Every structure is written in structure tokens, then in C-alpha cells.
Amino acid sequence: MSTTRLALVMHEPLGAAFQECARHVLGRTPDLQVFDVVPDASPAGETERILNWVRQGHPDEPILMLCDLYGATPFNIAAQALRQGLEEGYVIHLLTGTNACMVLKALTDQQENPDSLSERVRQGALRGIVNADPPPDC
């Protein structure tokens, strides 16, 4: 079974911050690629940068890209890279709304079934959202 390659495509400096958080929590350098998109970045240039990374792997190696905000520039860049990568025969999944739970889940499940990884990561994000308010005094 192939290991899923992971990439964070986010507004700068969020991807690097998630990477550093994962390094802190896991106690090791996480196996992921960060594409932090600066405000004046060229979308075409950033898309090509992601595709160059995609093409470094074998088409049978699945890829999971995580973005911060649906519809924002980093998402649009990742979506374009996704479309082009799929046309070239790569297996790529894209999730948005990334939080720390998602990044950690992706990294800890990276070696498991790549076909269901994106759904497990999505579910991990939902399980990490907890209303931790104390109950009101009665």
C-alpha cells in the first residue's frame, strides 16, 4: 500500500504554523509539504509550484491536499492543481477548513488505506470540534 503524500496549501504563515504544531505534538518532523501562499502570489505560478511537487511522485502515490478556506486564493490554486493533476493521472484529494486535528490525523493515518484517508481526516476534524463550555450553575 502506498503512503499518501500530504500538502498544506494555505494563506501564509498558516501552513508553516500547522507544520510546526505537528512537529511539537508528534515529537518529529512531519512528512508533509507546505505551500504558504503570500498575498501577492501569482496563482498560475503557485499552481505550477504545486504541480512540480505532485510530479515528483509516482501517479500511483495518492496525494491529500489540505486548505484553510474554501473559495479563497489558496483553495483556488489547489483546486486548479487538483484538476491538472487528475488529468495527468494522479490520485489527488482536496479538503478545506483545515484545523490542527485534521493535520495530525492525516499525519498519523498517512500509512493506512489511502482510499479512505480524506474521509477519516474530515471525520477527525469534526470529532475535534467540541463545545467545552462549563455547564451553567443551577
Image (cartoon, rainbow, N blue to C red):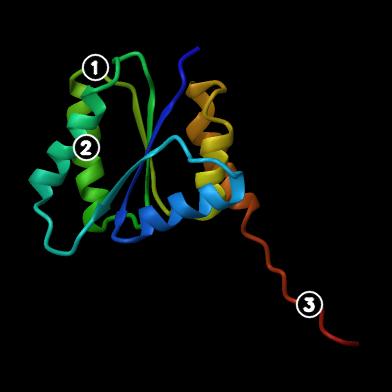
Q: Residue 54 falls in which quadrant of the image? A: top left
Residue 25 vs residue 42: left or right? Answer: right
Q: Residue at x 27, y 56 (%)?
A: 71
Q: Residue furthest front?
A: 28
Residues under numbered marks 1 and 2 in contact, where contact means CB atoms less than 8 Å apart: no
Q: Nearer the viewer, residue 127 or 9?
A: 9
Q: Which residue is mark 1?
A: 89
Q: Nearer the viewer, residue 20 or 138?
A: 20
- Determine crowd level at label 1: few under 14, some 14-19, many 20+ residues with C-alpha closer than 10 A: few
Q: Amino acid at mark 1?
A: Gly
Where is residue 133? Give x, y as percent.
73, 75
Q: Residue at x 24, y 41 (%)?
A: 79
How far apart, in angstroms, are the residues tagged by discs 1 and 2? 15 Å
Q: Residue at x 57, y 31 (%)?
A: 109
Dot 2 or dot 3, earlier in sequence: 2
* Residue 68 visible here: no
- Determine crowd level at label 2: few under 14, some 14-19, many 20+ residues with C-alpha closer than 10 A: many
Q: Secondary structure at mark 3?
A: loop
Q: Secondary structure at mark 1?
A: loop
How far apart, in angstroms, are the residues tagged by discs 2 and 3? 44 Å
Q: Which residue is mark 3?
A: 134
